[in-house]
């Protein structure tokens, strides 16, 4: 069986501007896969997938995941859940 996939990846870094200390980092990949079917159909599908994929929705998904537990960015001091979401990020 043949399959194709498109991967986007974003790297986030939060740095203290006074000290230069890295406070938080996250590397967030997102993979969109397609597959299945007979070999000829899959070759055509894989080629079309690579050529016609709209990367913007994939990048949006990766960006959304960067702010969700367990690897995402915890909420700040002005958010109602501040300090209550610690267990989700351990």
Image (cartoon, grey):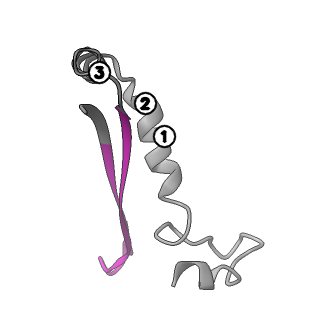
Task: Check contact, mark 3 vs mark 2: CB within 8 A.
Answer: no
Residue placed most toward the observer, 53 or 36 = 36
User: With 56 as the anchor, is 73 left or right in this view?
Assistant: right
Q: Looking at the image, is 19 positioned above or below residue 7? A: below
Q: Earlier in the sequence, mark 3 or mark 1?
A: 3
**Residue found at the far right of this picture:** 80
Read off the residue under disc 2. 56
As drawn, the label of residue 38 is: 3
Read off the residue under disc 1. 60
Residue placed most toward the observer, 84 or 14 = 84
Q: Earlier in the sequence, mark 3 or mark 2?
A: 3
* CA distance separating discs 3 and 2: 29 Å
Q: Which residues are magenta?
A: 8-34
Tag 3 secondary structure: loop
| Residue for point 69% across, 78% down | 82
Please say whether residue 30 is one of the residues in the magenta stretch.
yes
* CA distance separating discs 2 and 1: 6 Å
Residue placed most toward the observer, 44 or 58 = 44
Task: Check contact, mark 2 vs mark 1: CB within 8 A.
Answer: yes
Image quadrant in which you'd find residue 58: top left
Tag 1 secondary structure: helix
Please say whether residue 82 is one of the residues in the magenta stretch.
no
| Residue for point 56% across, 63% down | 68
């Amino acid at each position: 069986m043949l399959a194709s996939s498109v991967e986007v990846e974003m790297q986030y870094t939060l740095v203290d501007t006074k000290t230069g200390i890295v406070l938080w980092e996250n590397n967030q990949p997102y993979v969109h896969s397609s597959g299945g079917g007979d070999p000829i159909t899959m070759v055509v599908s894989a080629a079309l997938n690579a050529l016609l994929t709209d990367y913007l929705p994939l990048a949006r998904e990766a960006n959304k995941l960067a702010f969700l537990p367990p690897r995402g960015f915890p909420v700040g001091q002005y958010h109602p859940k501040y300090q209550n979401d610690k267990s989700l990020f351990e």
